[in-house]
Image (cartoon, grey):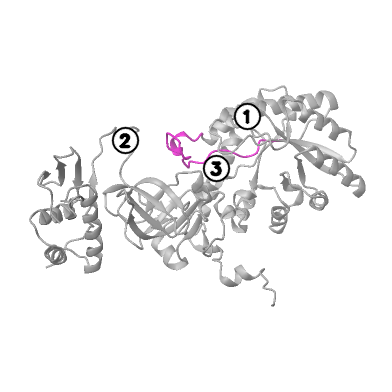
Amino acid sequence: MQILEEIKISDNGFVFNALTGESFSLNPIGLEIIKMIAANSDFDEIRKTILDKYDVDDLSFEKDFYEFSTMLKHYQLTQQNNPLNFV
Amino acid sequence: MEKLNYEKPIISKITAGVPNKFGLSTKQRIIAEIDSIPVAKLADEFGSPLFVFSEKTIRETYNKAKQTFETHYPKVQFAWSYKTNYLDAICSIFHDEGSWAEVVSVFEFEKALSLGVKGSNILYNGPEKSEENLKLAINHNACIHIDHFDELYLLIKITQEMNKKARVAIRVNLDAGIYPMWDRFGFNYENGEAWSAINRIMLADNLELIGLHTHIGTYIMSALGYGIAATKFSSLMVGIHRKFNLWLKYIDLGGGFASKNTLKGAYMPGSETCPTFDDYAKAISNAIITSEIPHENLPILFLETGRALIDDAGYLITSVLANKRSTTGRRTIVIDAGVNLLFTSFWYNLGVFPSREISDLMEDTTIYGPLCMNIDVIRDAINFPQVKTGDRLVIERVGAYNVTQWMQFITYRPNVVLIDLEGKAHIIKKKESLETLRVNEFNPKR
């Protein structure tokens, strides 16, 4: 999963999508995770960082991360596969 | 190293719009306890979902209403509307405070008698009264509110056969400026039907006309409507006195006072728009007192207020079963209480609140019940904080109609608890079980 180049993320959790003009807000953990995604960390790295730092169990975080990444995809902040590129 | 508190990662879209046009607080309200008992403790002890009633709130609301009306009018008598909530423990509190019983079926009539209400203190309403039911009412000297001519003639026949007198009032429907006008019950005022019924009753030897009854509608947001009804009743009373030299004992303006719940589609929250008891009392008492009825002949004002007296005293504790995302990315949560327990969720945007401090991050959310039915929606749209599976939520103002109109569907109906004045919780209706549900079932042998 990669964050689109056009997405600008501020240090206070404000996200701007220059492609669509839409803006979003993140909570502090959401900001931390999106920055790790933008830095090309994979899920295992992100999970380790969060589990080391926060009081959360593995499965709960996996569930929350799944929902979070689904929302990033839903808001079109991540690179989507080109649906026409199926050959 | 001690780990930091975790909060699930959230991203929410910022939508431009007018923020908070009423200046209401956006801070999430928490209902952590009910009458000083923690919500979590109640749920742990009695299960979830769980209806909880506060005796303190019931008595306080009743006394506030009574005092307000008595400040404006000298003779006021409340009659507890059984259909609003006929759990024995709830009815008993109202009777203990001095309420009569207002019933609309023989089941409710028998329930009132079983709770020790004198037959003469029962107002018997409704369009469904069989010959057998009417005999019961006559034998107990109840006030029978006649709904239609067939019932009137049946009463004439029965009282002749029994050679007994029946104390009666007529239910009148009238134009009080309320739309839609409830004209399916009783005799119409404007077209003279009510006057005809009165004349026929006065000709019947065994019928004693003692009152007039109306019920202009439900969740009435205009106190003025009650004023109009009281004005029309006052002139009817004066007319009866002119023709028959009789001052009726009472006028009964029914129920219908709004509670603070917010109706679906309402622009403003119900807590901001609902008239106060004072508004209703002023409108009604001004109309009667300024009429031609002499002060010494003023009728007793009966009120069958249900919803406005009990809604605030009832809570439903429920638990979060799941968090989900719809195909549009919208957050939805599933709770363990469905529309089968919350009939009023079809009319109101019920207030749903967390029972503990959680994230301040709010998101537009749909709250579904647990039934495997598409209609099982408790809130279409509510700005709600992030919650986890197992979190307890509290739905407020569910005291009216839910524990009478609830439906046994798929699951057992839950415990109902009353918190008494000492702060002790008692089960007043036990959770159903397979045995209690099967008690009247029979499976023919094959």
Nearest to viewer (mark 3 / mark 1): 3
Label 2 sits on what residue type?
Answer: Asn
Mark 1 packing: few (<14 Cα in 10 Å), some, or many (20+)? many
Give the residue drawn at x 57%, y 71%.
B434
The label shown at residue B20 is 2
The image shows residue B101, relative to residue B283, as above or below, that is below
Which residue is label 1 attached to? B285
C-alpha span from label 2 to label 1:
38 Å
C-alpha span from label 3 to label 1:
19 Å
> Is residue B250 visible to the viewer in this orientation of the structure?
no
Quarter of the figure with residue B182 = top right
C-alpha span from label 2 to label 3:
28 Å
The numbered mark 3 sits on a residue in which chain?
B
The image shows residue B426, relative to residue B166, as above or below, that is below
SS of the residue under disc 1: helix
SS assignment for the magenta stretch, majority: loop
The label shown at residue B244 is none
Q: Is residue B316 left or right of residue B134?
A: left
